[in-house]
Amino acid sequence: SKDKKIILHIGELVWYNMVEELINSVPTWPENYILVLHGWGQKDYLNYLKQLAEKNGLYNKRIFISTEILPQEDLDKMVSSADIGVALYHNVDLNFYYMASGKLFHYLKCGLPAIATDFPNLKKVVEENCCGICIHDEDEIADAIKEILNLIKNYRRNRIKKILEKLVRFGIK
């Protein structure tokens, strides 16, 4: 339905991508906001995520987990149909702290504003392109979602073109 707002995580479904924190934050979101986790992961962990979502009675109601492999074109369509992309990470080591997130660039390529962890390189991309919000911890997820949805036209129209220009310059299509 059109009044639903889709918050999307794509990629590996593992603890260091903060998917548990995302699931646990859903009850604090407005009723019409849903979480879609699309990606891959170990079967035991995927079952754990499902149980976590079921604990609050939200599995397949406001929390959806998809592991279907999609062709790139279909993945782009799915990403483009969402309202916000999420690129959150635990600070596991310096590699994570200074990373350039592929999922963040995928969201931006598809015109999706993003919520990212406040790590230096992620923050630089988000701030330079005015395309989302960086947060420090999971307690800020709900407020970041609300803020982005209030400003979504600005995020989608004003600055996404900048990141696309940069991606083309580096040969990424």
Image (cartoon, rainbow, N blue to C red):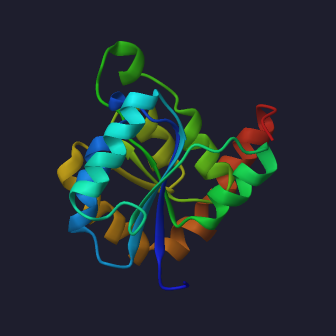
How far from the left and from the top, in percent, is residue 127?
44, 48
On screen, residue 146 above or below 52? below
- Residue name at image x 41 percent, y 37 percent: 46
Task: Report how many numbered discs are placed on residues in the image.
Answer: 0
Quarter occupied by residue 88: top left
Quarter occupied by residue 79: bottom right
On screen, residue 103 above or below 97? below
On screen, residue 29 above or below 114? below
- The residue nearer to you, when weighing 113 against 128, is 113
> Could you tell whether 157 is left or right of 14 in the image?
right
- The residue nearer to you, when weighing 68 against 5, is 68
How far from the left and from the top, in percent, is residue 85?
50, 54
> Could you tell whether 89 is left or right of 7 in the image?
left
- Residue name at image x 51 percent, y 41 percent: 125
Q: Is residue 33 visible?
A: yes
- Residue name at image x 21 percent, y 43 percent: 137
The quarter of the picture where the C terminus appears is top right
> Could you tell whether 79 is left or right of 24 in the image?
right
The quarter of the picture where the N terminus appears is bottom right
Identify the residue at the far top of this view: 94
On screen, residue 113 above or below 49? below
- Residue name at image x 53 percent, y 66 percent: 155
How far from the left and from the top, in percent, is residue 121?
45, 31
